[in-house]
Every structure is written in structure tokens, then in C-alpha cells.
Image (cartoon, rainbow, N blue to C red):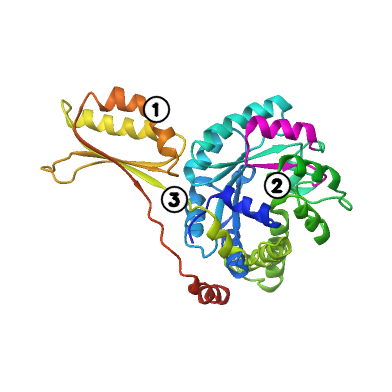
Amino acid sequence: MPLVDMKDMLQHAYQHGYAVGAFEVVSLDFLDGIMLAAEQARAPVILSMAESHFEYFDFDLIMPAVEAAAKRALVPVAIHFDHGTCIETAVNGINRGCNGVLVDASHEEFMENIRITRQVVETAHACGVAVEGELGYVPGVEGEGAEHYPGELAYTSLAEARAYVERTEVDFLAISIGTVHGHMKGKPKLDYQRLKQINDALDLPLVIHGGSGLSDDQFHRLISNGVAKINCFTALSDAVAKQIRKNIKIEISSGYIGLAKNINHAVAAEVERCMRLWGSAGRAAEVLARCESWTSVEQIIICTVEGLDNSDASILMNEGRRMLSSIPGVRDVFSGEAVQKDARYHYTWRIRLCHPVVVDSYRKHAAYINFINKLFRPVAGKCINIDFQEVTPVSSQYQLEPVIRRKVMS
């Protein structure tokens, strides 16, 4: 099954009364465990990449693996850039393969939160990417949560929620009704009345951050009042820590491989438990039928140039690659010279765009216009310029069961 549009995925969850888990990836063990669970449970899943954890891994290096896992999956997958700090990091997330983004400005004043989020929406929507906004503040209390999300709890206001969604046009809204990031002290008390009022007023998928420590009944009440996306990391981190401590006792003389044994299965067990609790298990086929596939576009430019020697042509190619790579929604740019010296066309650019909707905004972007008008047209001779849309393979549903059994047994 291909990557799917994240907005379509969460709209389906919202309309059918269940929640999709956004499980945070911090290593390949986490990635493997999350995908193992999603295929075992036949559940849609969101692979979440939180900027607050980028100090622990190289985002640009891990994203190709995340995207590859999503594309070879037998269940619908979306990739979310979570808790971005600014528009620049969000654009990098989009250009690396995320099809949902959150730039968290919830700690800012209300109008500044709106301004920042609106800028993100305009940029992301021009790339076909869904946007999550956050209003109110979900702090951390203990452990990693306290370090990454300092400050006091601030509940989401109904009046501000209305104005925020209207002015920003976000696709989903993360709200604060009493949860915290990381571990929670004492029994959590959630403001269900506030949640119901916000859901009734907005009629769009709601998101809960900081769900660790909630009971099964609390999760069910959240979902019945419009929560369609639940972020999850602390419970996975705890499961992995428990497995490592178990390995230490068993594998006393082992090195890294022995200590890391079965980490992916520990993640998978917790992820699958959440999927079944939140109602997404068994929904893969119907979600795929309702969701638009997330497909890329490649623009191919092949040309001759006139009046340039090899050195000047090389400068033109490299400058074109630099300028075009800066545009939101551009995944990568290849520039090349013909191997055959007598080729009809001498040079090429191959520009991969994240989604068909990007074609329009890409051609209107200042960097593209400057490249075409100031660098390319003055020296271009014969030229061919064609946009190609990716042809997505159709997965065979009957293959699901055997593939899952092989992965579970491996």
C-alpha cells in the first residue's frame, strides 16, 4: 500500500469514531516495531518525527528509511513532522518526505500563534501537506517531557479555538484539556466538557498530546468526543527501557546486539495494544479505499545551452540545483551532463516534487522564476520540459497474511 494523504486518513477516523496512533520514531528499532504492529493489527498508522528529539538522531539520515518503510507497508501510512520550532524546519520536513506538519507556537501569545501557524498553513497547503495546529499548552511534568516542554498547563479556550481555526485554516487541532507530556503525577483529571464543547464547535479532527497514564475509559471518552489522533512516545520508551533492563540480566556478557535484542518486539506489543484500544485495528482496507495516495511528481528538463564553455555551464547547473532545492515541496534536484558527447541534448535537471499540487506553487515561487528568467532562458537552446506523476503499484490484499506471519516469526 502506498503512503496516503494524512488529512484523508484522520477525516476517516474522525467520521467513524476511532483514533489513529502517531507513534514517534527515534531509531530503526522503533520504526520496525511500529510497522510490525500496524501490519499485525491491520491498522492505519502515523510515523511521527518530533524535532524535539533530533538531538538523538540525524533526521536527514533516518527519513529515507522511514519513507521506505511506509512505501513498502501493507497498511496505509502517513509521516508527520511533529513539534517543529519554525517554518524553516517544517519546510525541511516536507522536503524530506513528511506529509503532515506541526509547528508548535502554543507557547506564544494567541495572535502570534495565529500568525506563525497561518504562515505554515499557506506554505504546507501549497505542497498538499496537512497542518496540525496547537492551542493551549501541554507541559511536561517528569522525565524527558519536563525537559522538552517546560511551563505550566494552559487549557484550550473554546472562544480562542473557534477564532484560531477560522483564521489559520488548520486541518487538525491539538488541544489541552489536562494531559501532560511524559509521565504524569497522580491520577489525570481531564476536562471532558471543554473537549465536547470544542468538538461541537469546530467539527474537525482533534489531537491529544501527552496521553501516557490515561485509563482505557479515558481514551474511549476522548475518542467519542472528537479525538482522531493520539501521540505516543513515553509508553514506547518505557517498554524499550524495560526490555533493555531484561536483556542486561540475561545477556550479561553480551555487547550491543545482545542488549538491543527484541527491542522492536517490545515496541510492537505496546503499539498494537494502543491500536486495538483506540479502535484503528482492522481499519486498513477501508482507510485505503477512502484515502488519496501520496504520490510524487518529477519535472524533467533537458536542453542545450549556447554561448557557455564547460566551466560556465557547470556553474549554471550547480546554481540551478541550489536555487530549485530551496523551494518548499522540492524533494531533491539532480543536474547532469550528457555522457555521450554527440548527444542531441547536453544537460538535464530532474526535480522531484512531493505532490502533484506543488507543481503550481513551484512554478510561481520566486526562486524558480529567477532561475528561469535570469539564468536559464538567456542561454537555453533546444529544450524539453515535462512533468511526470508517479505511478503507484497496486498492493495485493491476499498477500497481507503470509507477509505478516513471516515478519512476526523473524
The alpha-carbon separation of the residues under discs 2 and 1 comes to 35 Å
Q: Is residue 401 above or below residue 239?
A: below
Tell me the tag on residue 367: 1
Query: Magenta residues, as a range?
Result: 156-179
Which kind of residue does numbered mark 3 sit on?
A: Thr
Q: Which of 169 and 377 is in front in this view?
A: 169
| In front of the other: 181 or 394 | 394
Task: Assign a secondary structure to mark 2.
Answer: strand
> Residue 330's x, y, as percent?
42, 39
**Residue nearest the viewer, comparing 26 with 197:** 197
The image shows residue 275, relative to residue 125, as above or below, that is: below
Q: Is mark 3 on a helix, strand or loop?
A: loop
Q: In this view, does 186 lie to the left or right of 255?
A: right
| Earlier residue among tags 2 and 1 | 2
**Real-space Cα distance between discs 2 and 3?**
25 Å
| Quadrant including the C terminus | bottom right
Q: Disc 3 designates what residue?
A: 295
Q: Residue 54 carries which label?
A: none
Is the residue marked by circle 3 packed among few (<14), some (14-19), or many (20+) residues within 10 Å? some
Extreme residue in the left direction: 342
Kind of residue at badge 2: Val
Q: How crowded is mark 1: few (under 14 residues within 10 Å), some or many (20 or more)?
A: some
Q: Do the residues labelled 2 and 3 touch (CB within 8 Å)?
A: no
Q: Which mark is residue 207?
A: 2
Residue 163 magenta-drawn? yes
- Between the C-alphas of marks 1 and 3, the distance is 24 Å
